[in-house]
Image: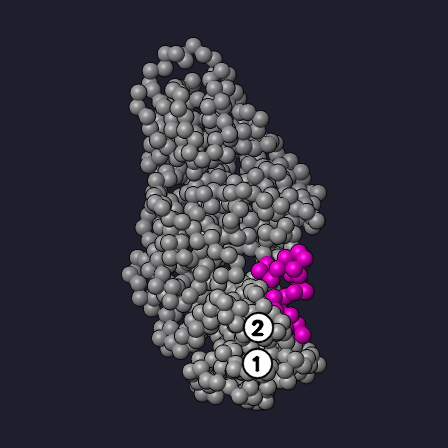
Amino acid sequence: MQVQKSFVCGFRMYIEITQNNSQHINKPAECLAEEDHKTFGNRGNMSNFDITQNYHMVPLDKISGYDVRPGFYEINGATAIPGGVSFTIHSNQATTCDLLLYRRMEDKPYATLRFPDHYRIGNVFSMIVFNLNIDEFEYAYRLDGPYDPAHGKIFDKKKTLLDPYARAVTQQSVWGANTDRSKPYHARVVKDDFDWGNCKQPILPMDDLVIYELHVRGFTKHESSGIELNHRGTFAGIMDKLPYLLDLGVTAVELMPIFEFDENMGQREVDGKKLLDYWGYNTISFFAPNTSYCSSVEYNREGNELKQMIKLLNENGIEVFLDVVFNHTAEGNENGPFFSFKGIDNNIYYMLTPDGYYYNFSGCGNTLNCNHPIVQQMIIECLRYWVIEYRVDGFRFDLASILGRNEDGSPMSKPPLLESLAFDPILGNVKLIAEAWDAGGLYQVGSFPAWNRWVEWNGKYRDDIRRFLKGDNDTIHSASTRIQGSTDLYDESRRSFYASINFLTCHDGFTLHDLYTYNDKHNEANGWNNTDGSNDNQSWNCGVEGETDDPDINRLRRRMVKNAWSVLMCSRGVPMVLAGDEFGNTRFGNNNPYCQDNEISWLNWDDLKKNHDLFEFCKFMIAFRRKHEPITKKTPDCDYGFPEVSEHDTTPWAHDFSGDSHYLGIMYAGRTRGKNDIIYLAVNTYWEDLQLSLPELPNGSAWSLVVDTFQEKSVVKPRISSGHETIGARSVMIFTAK
C-alpha cells in the first residue's frame, strides 16, 4: 500500500489508495458514495485534515473508456487526486452534463463523458475520472436544459462552457495572442506545490497603510523600466522593482485586475493602433490568475509566479491587495459572448428584468446577481481561495455598491453578501475596500454597509480637495473636514477615519501630473471622438493646455503636484497613490486609457531621472507621515493643552470659512514615543502671498519649518521659525514643534 499526498482546494488531504479493492468489490454504489461523504465530508472547513484510516477508492463505472466513480460533491471545480481528477459542477436547472476532455491546444475533445444520473446529488454533478495526467489534458463542459429566454433560461447543449471554478484558463498565456474569438475557453487542472516556507503576512494596521495602485503590465512594460526583457509587464517585473518600492516607502500594493481576462475580447483598431481590453475589468474566471502576467508559461502550475511575488513583498513588509470585479462578467448582455455562466444558470448568476433581459448597473452589459445564495457562495469561496492559496492581504471591490443590490436591482439595507464577507473567519484579517458606488447611480460614500469592517474609496475626498487646491471658492470648510478624516462621513460612533481611503488620483482619470497640465480630457486615441471618460475632472492647466516650455508654468505645475501630495500625506485616513505620480508620469491628457496598451499607459521610468527631486519629495512626505503618529491615529494628549486636531486661519485659532477664503491651517497634537509631537499644515491656495501666524508655544519650544513647496528645494533644512511667516502663492508649508 502506497500513501500519496494531494492538495485539495488548499487543504492537505492524506489519502490511502490501493489497487487491491476486493473488500469493496461487491458493495453497491450508494454505499460507497456514502463512505466517500463520511470520509471526505466537511473537509472544506478543515486544514491539515489527516485521514488515518485505510480507505480504498475504486472505480465503479466505465464511461467512454474511462474508469469513474462519484466525486467530491463539496469541492467545486477540478481537483487532482492520486490516480485521477474529481470534476464537480452545479446547475439548478440543467438536465444533463457532459465533461469534455481535450488534448492541449486542440479544438475538438478526444473524450466526452456524460455524468450518469446517479452521479448527481441535488443540483451537483460530480465524478472522479481515473488515470488522467493533469499535464496532458484540458477540460470544459456542455449542459442541456430548458430554453425559455423570457424567463432567463438559455441552455444550449452545443455550447462549450468554461468551469466557473477553473483555476487556470487556456490560450491566455501570451498577451495579445489569442485573437480567434471562435475558440471556446478551456480549463486546466492546477497542482499546488508552492512552498510558502515560514513566510508570515505583515497584517498591518490601517493607520500604517500607504497604498500604491499599479497595473501589472503598465508598471514595467516600458523599456525604460531597466529590467530584463522577459520580466517586463509581469509579476516578476514587480519583484525586480522591490528595492524601488521599499525606497519610496509604500506599505501596500494594490494590483489592478489580475483575474483571468481576455485582452482581445474588444479589440479594435484606431489610427493604425490596436486597442485592447488593457485594464482587465472584464473577468472570464474569478479563480484563475491572468497567465499573460507571468514571465514564463506555468503549465499546471499557474499562479506560482504571483505567489512568489506576494511572498517576496510580504517578507519585506508590503501587503498585496487585489482589485476584484464581482459586479459583472465578460459575457455582456444579450448580444455578448456565451462561454460560462449563461450556459450554466443564466437566470441565477445574472440580474434579469421580468422579460429576461440583463440589468446593467455595471455599465458593461450585465450585472452579477451577487445576493443570490448560489452567487454568494461562489464569491465567498473565491475570496477564501485567494486568501488561502495566494495569501492575499486585501481586496478592493470594483463598483461595490452592486454587491448590495437585491435580485431585482433594488438596494438592500443589510446585504447578506456584504455581511457574510464582513464576518467570514477566513477573511478576518483581510482588508475589504469598497468602491462605494456603481454605474446605476447608487452612491454610498459614507453610507456603505460596513459592520465596522468595510472601508471605502472616498470619492468626496478626491473631489473636495481637488477643488480646494486649484483655488475654487467655497471649499475651505469641506477641505478641512476631508483633511481631518471626513468626520461627517465616518464619525467615531460608527466608524473611525480609518474607513476613509483618501486619494486624489487613481487608474480612472488624470494622473497627478495631468491634473495640473490639462483643463480638458484628450481621449481621441480611444476612438470615441473624445466622448468617453469623465468631463468633470476638477483639473487646472495652470494657464496653458498641455505640455509647455514656459519655466514659470512648469514651476507652478510642479508646486501644485507637491501641494497635492503634501495634503494627502497630512490627511487623516488611509492614503492611496497612483503608480508614477511620484515622478510625474503622464498619460498625455487621456483620462480613460482602459484600451491603451502602449506609451499612454506604461510608466516611463525616464521621468524618474528627469523628476528625481519630485520623487525625493514624495518619498520624504511618506516617511514624514509615518514618523508623526498624530496624523495617522489618536495618540495620548500633548503637554501643551492643544486639542488633538484643530483648524486655523492665518490668525491662530480663528476660523474663516467665508466663500473667498483660500487659506487653511490644520494642527495635529499628541505624543509619539513619549514625546510631544505637534504638526502644523499650512495651505495657501490663493494666487498671492499671505502672512500667517502660528499658534503660540510654551516657553522653551519653537516651531521648525520642514517643508515649503514654494521653494525649489521643497524639503528645507529645518529652521526655527519666529511663528510669523510669509507663505507663498499657491503653496504648502509644514511646521513641527520642537
Three-letter amino acid code of the residue under disc 1: Pro
Quarter of the image where one finds residue 420: top right
- Which residue is identified by label 2? 639
Asked if the magenta segment contains residue 398, the reply would be: no
In the structure shown, which secondary structural element does the residue marked by tag 1 occupy? Answer: loop
Q: Could you tell me which residue is drawn at 55 percent across and 38 percent down?
A: 343
Q: Quick one: 434 or 301, which is closer to the camera?
A: 434
Q: Which residues are magenta?
A: 477-499
Q: Position of residue 709 (x, y in %)?
A: 49, 82
User: Residue 534: where, in percent of width, then height?
Assistant: 59, 67
Can you see residue 332? Answer: no
Numbered mark located on residue 363 in the image: none
Examine the image and state in which quarter residue 300 appears: top left
Camera-side residue of 524 and 23:
23
Q: Look at 36% across and 46% down and name the residue there.
A: 198
Report the number of discs: 2
**Helix, strand or loop for disc 2:** loop
Q: Cα distance, mark 2 to mark 1?
A: 9 Å
Circle 1 residue = 698
- Residue farthest along the left direction in this orientation: 228
- For the N terminus, which image quadrant? top left
Horizontal placement of 222 versus 428: left or right?
Answer: left
